Image (cartoon, grey):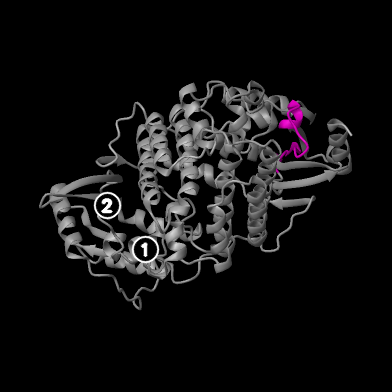
Amino acid sequence: MKVYEIITRFIQENHYTQDENVIGILFYGSSKYGLNNENSDIDLLIIYDDSDSRNKKFPLIRGNACIDGMRIEYFKKTMQEVHINAEEDFMTQSNASLSIIGKAEIIYEKDNAMHFLQEYILNKFKNGIPPITEDSAKEKLATISNRIERLEKYAVSKQYGYYFNHLYNLIIEMIRRFYHELNGIPRIETYKGFKVYTDKKYQDMFSIGCVPEPEFLQMYFELVQNKEKTPEEKLEEIRQFYDYAKKGLDFDENNHRISIKSRNYEDVVINDSADLDGIELNTPIIPKDTFDAVIKFIEEMHYMEDEHFLGIIVYGSSLTGFNTESSDIDLHVIFDNDNLSRMVRGKSLIEINGTKIKIEYFEKLIDEEYLMAENEFLHQDNAALSILGKGSIVFAKDDSLIKLQKYVLHRFNIELPPLSADEAKEQISIIDNKIKKLENLLLEDSSYFYHFYHIVLEKIRETYHKILGISQISTDKVPRIYTDASYRNAVCKKNPPQDFVDEYLRIASLRGNKKQMLEELKRLYGKVKQGIELGDEYSIPIESGLKHLLLYLKNSSSHNIANSRVLKKQSISQI
C-alpha cells in the first residue's frame, strides 16, 4: 500500500477531518522525501485550534499506529503549543520546527491555517539561528575539558580501562554538539548526522542550510569509525578534535573565570517553613593540605575583604580522601543575595612550597544554592547533597551556611521521585526509536554503528535511573560509583540493581560483532523497561514545552517574557 493511501486510511479511521477542532495535518520526515527504508515510519503532526474563548483543553499526545504493517508516528498538538515549540527550538539552536512544520506537506487544513503557520515558521528561521554567547561556550568547554581529563585517567587505568571506549564516544558527541552551538549550526541528532553531513537530500529534509567545515567533519568521521587504535592514539585525536572545535576562543583549561547566569529555576520554591532544628551535621574534617590550599586561595582572591562574602563550602575528593596528585580542590564560594554579579565558574592554579594545586570553584548567591537543591530534587539529581549538605564550611561569616546545609539535608531526607507512568512511557518510546535506528545501521553494515551504540546505551542507563528514582550520575564517574561502595557513599549515590550494573559495565566494553552487541543491548533494555511494552499502537500524554520556554526566557537577557507572542492566546488570523 502506498504511503498516501495509508495516511488517508489513518485520517479516516480517526475521523480527524470531521473533528471541528482539528485545523491541520502535516506530513514530514523520510517517507515524505522518499528516503525511507523498511524500518521507517510515516511522520504526522495533527494540530488543534485552542484559540476558542471557551478555553478547551486538548491533551498533547505522542502516538504510534500501524496500518497494513506500516508504522505511523504522530503527535497531537495545539496551535499554541506549536508556537511554543518553535520559540523554544529557535532559542535552543534547533530547527526541528522548520523541518517538521515549515517544510512539511499539508495533508489537511482549515481556513488556510497551515499556510499561515508555515509562513510564520519560515519567517522565524529565515536568518538562521544565533550562536551561543562566549561565556556559555567557555562554560561548556570547562565541562568538556574535565571529561577529557577523566578519559586520560581511564586510558592508563588497569581497574577502569574497559570504560575508556564508552566515555570516548560520549565525549566525541559532546564536542560535536558544542561545535554546532558555537557556530550557529542547527542541532542535528547523532543518527541523522551520519547522513546529513554528506548527503544534500538529507540536508534538505532536515532544513540544514550549512554543515561544519570539511576539516571538522574529516576528524569527526575518523573518530567515530571505531578503528583499531591504542587509547593513546585515540586521546591524541580527540584532543585535536577538541582544539579544532574551540578555535578562536581564548580559553585556558587550567586558569579561567567565566560569568554564568542565575538559573532562576521556574516553579521552584524555597520552603521557608522547613523544620531544621532536628537536623544534625556530620561533615568531614578538612585535610591539612587541602585546608592550607583553600586559605591561600581565599587570600589571593581577597574574599575576606568583600562585605557580601558568607563563606566557602569545600567538597569533592580532596575532602573525602579519594583524591590523587592530579585532583582538583572543589569549592563553592557563597555570597549574600545583594551581590548580583557573583555568579562565576572558575579554575585557578595556586602554588604552595613549589607545588601547583588546581582549584575549581563556583561563586554563587546563597538563594541560588537553595534553588539548585530544590530543582535537583525535582529532576532526580542529588549533587547538591554531596556538595552542600555533606561539604565542610570554611570561614563562615554567620550561621547562614549551616542553615543551608541543614536545609539541603532536610530536602534529600526522602527518596527522589521516579518518573510518572506516562513520563516513563514517553522515554521508552524515544529509546524504541533509537534502537530501530541502530537496527538500520546494522542492516547497512555502517561503520557508525559503534558510535551510535554508545549513545543509545547511555540513554538507556540514564532512563533506568529516572524510572527507579535513583540520582543521576555524571557519565565519567559511573564505573567507580558502580563498583566502589566507599566512594559511592562518599558522593551520596545509590546503585541500580546489581544485575543491571554488571550487564551495563560489560556491555559498555563490547567491541567487534555488531549483531551480538545489538542483541546484548536489547536484552539489557528489556530489563530497563520494567515490563512497559508499548506495542505497535499507543497514545502517550506528553508535557507542554511552556515551562522550558519560560525558564529559558527568564534566564536570557536578550528576550522579554512580556513581549513573547507565544505566551498569549492567538487566533489563527493573528499568526
Residue 489 seen in this snapshot: yes
Q: Residue furthest left?
A: 353
Task: Tell whether position 32 is magenta.
Answer: yes
Real-space Cα separation, disc 1 to disc 2, in angstroms: 21 Å
N-terminal of the two: label 1 or label 2? 2
Residue at 54 percent across and 65 percent down: it is 496
SS for callout 2: loop
- Provide residue 234's location: percent of width, then percent of height: 43, 39
Q: Answer with the quarter of the image where residue 239 lies.
A: top left
Q: Nearer the viewer, residue 168 or 132?
A: 168
Residue hosting label 1 = 386
Q: Nearer the viewer, mark 1 or mark 2?
A: 2
Q: Is 448 displayed left or right of 432 in the figure?
A: left
Q: Residues within 10 Å of mark 2 (few under 14, many from 20)?
A: few
> For the image shown, how many numbered marks are present on the structure?
2
Q: Nearer the viewer, residue 112 or 288?
A: 288
Residue at 86 percent across and 36 percent down: it is 6
Task: Please say if 503 is above or below 221.
Answer: below
Q: Is 465 displayed left or right of 6 in the figure?
A: left
The three-letter amino acid code for the residue at tag 1 is Ser
Quadrant occupied by the N terminus? top right
- Provide residue 391's location: percent of width, then percent of height: 30, 64
Task: Please say if 296 is above or below 232.
Answer: below
Which mark, by number, is residue 326?
Answer: 2
The three-letter amino acid code for the residue at tag 2 is Ser
Task: Tell whether position 69 is magenta.
Answer: no
SS for callout 1: helix
Q: Residues within 10 Å of mark 1 (few under 14, many from 20)?
A: some
- Provide residue 158's location: percent of width, then percent of height: 40, 56
Tell me whether the residue at label 1 lies in contact with that at label 2, contact meaning CB atoms closer than 8 angstroms: no
- Numbered range of the magenta stretch: 28-53
Q: Nearer the viewer, residue 181 or 120?
A: 181
